[in-house]
Image (tube, coloured by chain):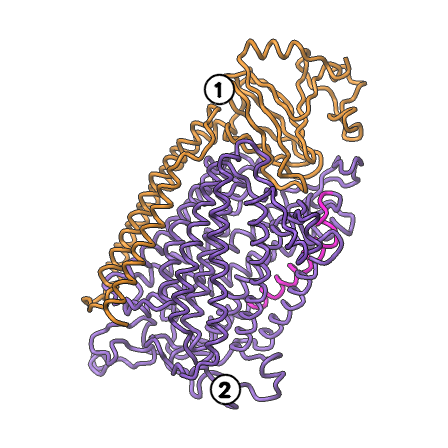
Chain colours: A orange, B purple
């Protein structure tokens, strides 16, 4: 291969690799995410920014080294002896070891775990506790009603629109439970704890704007908590493949001011009332 | 010709052969066939995701079962997604990279005449043939192929009421996977035994090329991890057909009726699946990295930088890979302390991976680079490890995974690791070892056309999938526009698809080059690249049993640009120079 042709190829490769890295770093830094609207969500975004800065820097350094070597040693010119001692090679490997240990372990643990604990720690006593039950392909929401107690439910009593939550009318606590399909009304600024259950297959309760994603596992009552920070309308998405209509297992969240929320709640009637 | 092949009839030489080289080629060609199907599925997937509102009457003519009124049905979309993943991971990459090149190259790299168990080797190939037939046949059964994702999570995969594909299609999927695992386990046992016991005189462990190291580690991982999936597959089959409830709790309501299952949990399956699933990623990725090291050394004309630190990094990766499976389940509702543990060990993998990255890049320092097609793909592989590996940190951190889990960020990430790194490894290996396999060189011009048509599109598409994931676009979604928040980013799907269509079409160039080069007049000779490893001391293609007299090894695999070497390198068989001998 002629030197000139090899130089052209090296230039093309250098441009390719620089282009790929630019596409990655600039693209990842672009504002794709829906605006954050929950308290811990800001922490999640902070972790993502941290990862962008650190891993972006590593990628840029690695790319520059690679294209530098390609340019220097790729054009068919003789190079000096490449022999290195195993000892020198061990010393060099300390750079990635220490670098990644700091970026990955120290950084991620310091930045990430507090946010993780915020989501999976015990909910505060004044948290608003609601129940969301997933089934193909909708979210069934239950408020405990004025007595603050969830009534008994039984899968055998579930009956389409007639009794979507499977509430037991013989349980006095069940009488004032409020049942809604697909829409969750919440107050701004208060911790919401959702008891999550599924009736059929795996689902995943996710609210992209809140950075919430929690699998809903049949047979297990799980939970997730968050604090909405902005009044408005948001979407619930199912993030775990759950069947044919998985792609439109959509729900709504309406976040009200505390007064509006109290007003809305007072207008609701119990399921058996 | 007679010296080149096993004696006996056409059947024992080419079909039911026990020669590792023939079996390697059989795996490779089977992978090519399955790749055509698996890639074809991805085209239909991309058409649907990018243009969910359009109708495709001409596709209905080709695939009358999948489309109705020109519209791809949602349940069939899920079958396409499921089968694309299954075929590409297990039936293409595993076959081509691990079983195909592993079989071909291990005995030649270590100086053995064949695999330790030649008959078992043949058996492992012939076990995947019914596996392939069952997998492909499942498209044609009532209700179509499996539709629960390549992860086959129950209850979706356990109950035929849950999704149409969970009928006969899912049963065939499980049976085919069980056969695949049986075959892969036989192959792995063979690889490990061969590498440990059949190395020729002088071939110590630390004189083995890195490809062999990665195949050894991948095989050990396979043996340790695959049994968990075998157990899971059998339990799932029993849940489906034997009335058991390993993965099914009580009180499930489907089709308006309460099911009688009781006492199990779907999470058990997830643990079993990922106990295999995560090491499986390394089973596929590590051999590609090993190949990259060998190719970079041969075309960089210098020793691999940090051979020993690379080996130790590979061993650390292998150990860690067995204890991190839970990072696929951060959002499953696991104990939060468990989530913290899995985060800590998962992100630790980036440390040995960064050592491999440094060693690959530093292997270009003071190199005399020859830009053959194999080298180009090895370089692109390094770039793909960078993006895929660092993106892995985003997903391995539980806190950011809370947002990114099950989004297109994950899709982009694993298409880099088990899609791009592995495929580029296959391409680098093919261009590099083709002369050894067939005695002829592939066409360089076509090779470079293949490279330049493939690589930009692949990076463009899979990087942009990360953007979609950041925007909240979820995976396995039939119509992404069903969510309002995803509508502003839907346009991105179109350039991604176009980039992928170009890259996919470019594979025709590869196939033409592959098959046309078989008939090139010019022969390659035993060592067209002046490479130092042992396979290049055998004729091209090597005869049955590889060498008339087994070679004896005197040095490491990468003695390039050493002072005093006649062609600038010492093959592994070159005895030490007289001076050095005198000192000893």
> How far across and how far down the image is residue B250, in percent?
74, 37
Outermost left residue: A80
Residue that appears at 79% across and 35% down: B256
Q: Is residue B584 visible?
A: no
**Residue B4: image tag:** 2
Instruction: Tell me, yes or no, whether the highlighted magenta stretch contains residue B165.
Output: yes
Distance between the Cα atoms at labels 1 and 2?
75 Å
User: For the N terminus of chain A, which image quadrant?
Assistant: bottom left
Q: Is residue A203 visible?
A: yes
Image-quadrant location for residue B311? bottom left
Outermost front residue: B57
Mark 1 residue element: loop
Q: Nearer the viewer, mark 1 or mark 2?
A: 1
Q: Residues within 10 Å of mark 2 (few under 14, many from 20)?
A: some
Mark 2 residue element: helix
Question: What span is in magenta?
Answer: B162-187
Q: Is residue B489 above or below residue B171?
A: above
Residue that appears at 75% across and 40% down: B262
Q: Chain of mark 2?
A: B
Q: Residues within 10 Å of mark 1 (few under 14, many from 20)?
A: some
Q: Is residue B484 above or below residue B228?
A: above
Disc 1 designates what residue? A230
> How far across and how far down the image is residue A53, in percent?
33, 38
Task: Using residue A253 as the reference point, say whether residue A99 is left or right of it.
Answer: left
> How far across and how far down the image is residue B300, in percent?
29, 67
Instruction: Tell me, yes or no, whether the highlighted magenta stretch contains residue B403.
Output: no
Q: Chain of mark 1?
A: A
> How far across and how far down the image is residue B528, in percent?
35, 78
Main SS of the magenta part reads helix
Task: Using residue B38 as the reference point, say whether residue A1 is left or right of it.
Answer: left
């Amino acid at each position: 291969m002629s030197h000139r042709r090899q130089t052209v190829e090296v230039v093309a490769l250098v441009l390719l690799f620089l282009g790929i890295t630019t596409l990655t770093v600039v693209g990842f830094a672009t504002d794709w995410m829906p605006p954050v609207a929950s308290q811990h969500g800001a922490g999640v975004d902070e972790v993502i920014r941290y990862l962008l800065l650190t891993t972006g820097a590593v990628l840029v350094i690695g790319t520059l080294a690679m294209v530098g070597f390609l340019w220097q040693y790729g054009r068919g010119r003789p190079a000096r002896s490449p022999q290195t001692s195993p000892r020198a090679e061990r010393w060099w490997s300390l750079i990635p070891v220490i670098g990644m240990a700091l970026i990955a372990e120290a950084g991620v643990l310091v930045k990430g775990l507090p946010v993780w604990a915020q989501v999976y720690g015990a909910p505060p006593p004044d948290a608003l506790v609601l129940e969301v039950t997933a089934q193909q392909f909708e979210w069934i929401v239950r408020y405990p009603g004025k007595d603050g107690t969830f009534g008994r439910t039984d899968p055998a009593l579930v009956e389409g629109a007639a009794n979507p939550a499977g509430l037991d009318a013989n349980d006095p606590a069940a009488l004032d439970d409020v049942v809604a399909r697909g829409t969750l009304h919440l107050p701004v600024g208060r911790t919401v704890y959702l008891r999550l259950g599924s009736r059929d297959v795996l689902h995943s309760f996710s609210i992209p704007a809140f950075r919430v994603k929690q699998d809903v596992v049949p047979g297990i009552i799980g939970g997730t908590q968050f604090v909405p920070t902005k009044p408005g309308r948001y979407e619930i998405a199912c993030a775990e493949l759950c069947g044919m209509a998985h792609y439109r297992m959509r729900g709504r969240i309406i976040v009200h001011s505390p007064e509006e929320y109290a007003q809305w709640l007072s207008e609701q009637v119990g399921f058996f009332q | 010709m007679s010296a080149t092949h096993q004696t006996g009839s056409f059947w024992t030489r080419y079909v039911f052969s026990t020669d590792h080289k023939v079996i390697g080629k059989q795996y490779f060609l089977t992978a090519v066939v399955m790749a055509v199907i698996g890639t074809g599925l991805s085209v239909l997937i991309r058409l649907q995701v990018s243009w969910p509102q359009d109708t495709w009457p001409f596709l209905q003519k080709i695939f009358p079962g999948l489309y109705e009124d020109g519209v791809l049905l949602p349940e069939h979309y899920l079958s396409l997604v499921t089968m694309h993943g299954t075929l590409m991971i297990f039936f293409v990459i595993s076959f081509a990279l691990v079983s195909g090149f592993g079989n071909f190259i291990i005995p030649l790299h270590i100086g053995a005449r064949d695999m330790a168990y030649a008959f078992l080797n043949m058996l492992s190939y012939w076990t995947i043939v019914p596996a392939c037939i069952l997998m492909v046949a499942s498209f044609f059964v009532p209700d179509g192929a499996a539709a629960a994702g390549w992860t086959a999570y129950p209850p979706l995969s356990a109950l035929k009421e849950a999704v149409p594909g969970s009928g006969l299609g899912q049963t065939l999927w499980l049976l085919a996977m069980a056969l695949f695992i049986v075959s892969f386990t036989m192959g792995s046992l063979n690889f490990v035994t061969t590498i440990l016991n059949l190395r020729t005189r002088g071939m110590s462990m630390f004189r083995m090329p890195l490809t062999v190291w990665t195949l050894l580690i991948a095989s050990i991982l396979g043996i340790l991890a695959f049994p968990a999936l075998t157990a899971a597959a059998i339990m799932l089959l029993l849940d489906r057909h034997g009335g058991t409830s390993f993965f099914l709790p009580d009180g499930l309501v489907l089709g308006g009726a309460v099911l009688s299952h009781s006492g199990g949990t779907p999470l058990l399956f997830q643990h079993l699946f990922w106990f295999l699933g995560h090491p499986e990623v390394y089973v596929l990725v590590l051999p590609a990295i090993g190949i990259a090291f060998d190719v970079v050394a041969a075309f960089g004309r210098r020793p691999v930088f940090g051979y020993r630190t690379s080996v130790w990094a590979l061993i650390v990766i292998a150990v860690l890979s067995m204890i991190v499976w839970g990072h696929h389940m951060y959002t499953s509702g696991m104990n939060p302390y468990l989530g913290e543990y899995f985060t800590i060990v998962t992100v630790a993998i980036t440390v040995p991976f960064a050592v491999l990255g440094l060693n690959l890049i530093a292997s270009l320092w003071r190199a005399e680079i020859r830009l053959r097609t194999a080298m180009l793909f090895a370089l692109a592989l390094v770039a793909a490890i960078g993006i895929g590996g660092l993106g892995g940190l985003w997903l391995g951190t539980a806190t950011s995974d809370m947002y990114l889990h099950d989004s297109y960020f994950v899709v982009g990430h694993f298409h880099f690791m088990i899609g791009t790194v592995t495929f580029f490894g296959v391409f680098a290996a093919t261009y590099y070892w083709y002369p050894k396999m067939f005695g002829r060189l592939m066409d360089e011009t076509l090779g470079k056309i293949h490279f330049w048509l493939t690589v930009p599109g692949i990076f463009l598409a899979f990087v942009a999938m990360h953007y979609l994931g950041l925007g909240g676009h979820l995976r396995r979604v039939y119509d992404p526009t069903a969510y309002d928040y995803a509508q502003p980013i839907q346009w991105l799907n179109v350039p991604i698809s176009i980039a992928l269509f170009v890259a996919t079409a470019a594979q025709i160039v590869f196939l033409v080059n592959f098959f046309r080069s078989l008939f090139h007049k010019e022969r390659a000779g035993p060592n067209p690249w002046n490479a130092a490893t042992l396979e290049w001391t055998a004729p091209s293609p090597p005869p049955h049993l590889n060498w008339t007299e087994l070679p004896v090894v005197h040095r490491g695999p990468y003695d390039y640009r050493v002072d005093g070497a006649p062609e600038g390198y010492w093959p592994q068989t070159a005895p030490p120079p007289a001076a050095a001998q005198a000192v000893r």
